[in-house]
């Protein structure tokens, strides 16, 4: 009698769980509990009768299902299943009988596994093909019309995936996925064929936008990147343009780019223009490649008119973390080929070194931490760039000297100096990652060994020492209490990664020399005089 009541209650849950009262839930749970814990003569883990009752109820319910004719009815069916309630009602059965017999008896499985295998076999097997077709159709509608049925689609696909996987039928699930991919490719191909004329019309509109609206404002257009932004939007459909349109399109593009290039007055704008060309003209198309080559040659010619191309690259790109190291190397390669290798080949070497930062372990507090060191070098060719010669914390100095030794060993004829202010370190303190200048990090690490700040300052010979120390205090990395300065090992911050590295290139000028008369040697005066004479073509 009790087993029959349990069967009826289980069917009631399966049909509509919202109509189940708390008393129904308790009654079903008690039937299972009392049966499994009742006394018997021989020792036995009871529960087989309950397990069979659940199986019978599931089979009976799934066999009574109506054929699923739409995605809406499938979604409604899934929403009413409420497997989690069944699992809670039968939780005592799972805890003992099922758990113990899983490995012993091949006919026993978890409630979830039993649920999915029986629904597959007795419930929706005959409707699966229809369900798959409805899902693919609904996805296509969502993709094209931005349908509001996304939640329904996701729920149905997830249930279908679980159904196949619990029944060890991954092949059918893969077939379903492949059928969707095929449908997508077919519709995409058809759309392209149908919309060729529409695409050509779009090209005309774009050409008008680029070359009529901005006809007399090429520089403004370049700075705002209107042209490159719009070109990027339509570049993928160039391959599908008809011949008359594509010829007209590239004639206009070439004319516009050459005019824009002609009106560029500053080195920085020229470099931005070059990078935009490299980024946006990367389609595998003969006409695009021809145009790119033409424009790049014009850019190189324009670069030749500016002085100190290598200085431009260092000051305005390398120091301020370039958008892409690879693009910088490409630019240098072009300059090396067309302008001569003497002034730029070593920059390429340095850039390649930047791609491989140094990782080293230092003791910070009581722990050894891995520190990432990115060192920036200058050579004597940059006579107008100012570098602050300082002595670093000894272990850090040894690491830098090791890097410098390797570079000089590979390039014995070159002369390199470390630009401490432009180099940076990434380290971790109290599980917070911090990016900071090499010179400031050196002070921080010196404080881990020496508490006398005057000794640290004298040793470093850093003219910016006081400013750097104040920076560390303001950023709470160093604490100053009662004229005692020490590292804040309990440093906290809401963010897990912090970038407090800020460096602007300082240039030596005639004013710099006048302000530092001690360094204003006879050789410096001679050098300046010779430079002026050469400019005046007197010598």
Image (spheres, rainbow, N blue to C red):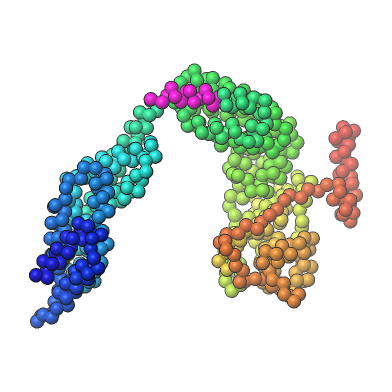
- Apparent side of residue 432 relative to residue 52 in the rendered image (left or right): right
Residue, far top:
244
The answer, for residue 403, to whether it is visible in the render is no
Number of residue marks: 0
* Quarter in which the C terminus is drawn: top right
Give the side of residue 37 with respect to residue 205, left or right.
left
In the image, residue 519 sits, relative to residue 36, either above or below, namely above
What is the magenta segment's predominant secondary structure? Answer: helix
- Magenta highlight range: 194-207
Q: Residue at x 34, y 32 (%)?
A: 187
Which is nearer the eye, 358 or 158?
A: 158
The residue drawn where x is 66% and y is 29% is: 218
**Does residue 378 lie above or below 395 as drawn?**
above
The part of the image, by quadrant, that contains residue 195 is: top left
Q: Residue at x 11, y 66 (%)?
A: 4
Q: Is residue 501 magenta?
A: no
Relative horizontal placement of residue 6, taking residue 311 as reference (left or right): left
Which quarter of the figure has residue 93? bottom left
Q: Quadrant of the N terminus?
A: bottom left
x 72%, y 72%: residue = 480
Q: Position of residue 284 (x, y in %)?
A: 48, 31
Q: Position of residue 454 (x, y in %)?
A: 78, 71
Residue 22 placement: quadrant = bottom left
């Amino acid at each position: 009698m009790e087993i029959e009541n349990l069967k009826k209650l289980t069917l009631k849950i399966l049909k509509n769980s919202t109509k189940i009262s708390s008393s129904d839930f308790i009654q079903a749970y008690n039937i299972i509990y009392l049966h499994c814990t009742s006394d018997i003569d021989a020792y036995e883990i009871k529960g087989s009768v309950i397990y069979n009752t659940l199986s019978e109820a599931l089979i009976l319910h799934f066999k009574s299902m109506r054929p699923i004719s739409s995605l809406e009815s499938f979604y409604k069916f899934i929403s009413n299943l409420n497997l989690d309630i069944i699992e809670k009602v039968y939780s005592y059965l799972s805890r003992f009988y099922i758990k113990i017999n899983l490995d012993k008896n091949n006919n026993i499985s978890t409630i979830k596994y039993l649920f999915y295998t029986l629904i597959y076999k007795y419930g929706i097997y005959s409707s699966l093909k229809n369900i798959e077709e409805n899902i693919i159709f609904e996805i296509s509608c969502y993709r094209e019309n931005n349908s509001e049925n996304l939640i329904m689609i996701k729920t149905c696909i997830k249930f279908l995936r679980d159904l196949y996987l619990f029944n060890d039928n991954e092949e059918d699930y893969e077939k379903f996925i492949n059928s969707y991919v095929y449908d997508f490719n077919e519709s995409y191909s058809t759309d392209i064929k149908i919309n060729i004329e529409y695409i050509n019309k779009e090209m005309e509109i774009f050409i008008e936008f680029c070359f009529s609206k901005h006809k007399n404002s090429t520089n403004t257009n370049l700075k705002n990147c209107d042209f490159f932004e719009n070109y990027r939007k339509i570049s993928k459909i160039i391959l599908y343009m008809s011949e008359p349109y594509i010829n007209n399109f590239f004639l206009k593009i070439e004319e516009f780019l050459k005019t824009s290039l002609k009106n560029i007055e500053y080195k920085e704008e020229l470099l931005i223009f070059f990078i935009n060309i490299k980024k946006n003209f990367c389609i595998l198309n003969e006409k695009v490649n021809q145009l790119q080559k033409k424009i790049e040659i014009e850019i190189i010619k324009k670069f030749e008119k500016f002085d100190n191309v290598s200085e431009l690259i260092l000051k305005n790109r390398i120091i301020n973390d370039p958008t892409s190291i690879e693009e910088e190397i490409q630019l240098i390669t072009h300059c090396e080929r067309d302008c001569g290798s003497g002034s730029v080949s070593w920059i390429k070497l340095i850039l390649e070194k930047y791609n491989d930062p140094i990782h080293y372990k230092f003791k910070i507090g009581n722990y050894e931490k891995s520190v990432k060191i990115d060192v920036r070098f200058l050579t004597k060719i940059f006579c107008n760039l100012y570098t602050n010669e300082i002595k670093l914390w000894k272990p850090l100095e040894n690491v830098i000297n090791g890097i410098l030794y390797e570079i000089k060993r590979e390039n014995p004829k070159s002369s390199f100096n470390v630009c401490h202010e432009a180099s940076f370190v990434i380290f971790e303190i109290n599980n917070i990652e911090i990016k900071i200048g090499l010179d400031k990090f050196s002070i921080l690490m010196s404080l881990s060994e020496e508490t006398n700040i005057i000794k640290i300052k004298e040793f470093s010979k850093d003219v910016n020492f006081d400013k750097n120390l104040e920076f560390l205090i303001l950023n709470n990395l160093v604490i100053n209490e009662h004229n005692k300065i020490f590292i804040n090992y309990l440093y906290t911050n809401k963010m897990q990664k912090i970038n407090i590295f800020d460096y602007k290139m300082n240039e030596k000028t005639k004013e710099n020399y006048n302000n530092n008369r001690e360094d204003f040697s006879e050789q410096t005066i001679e050098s300046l005089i010779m430079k002026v004479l050469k400019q005046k073509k007197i010598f």
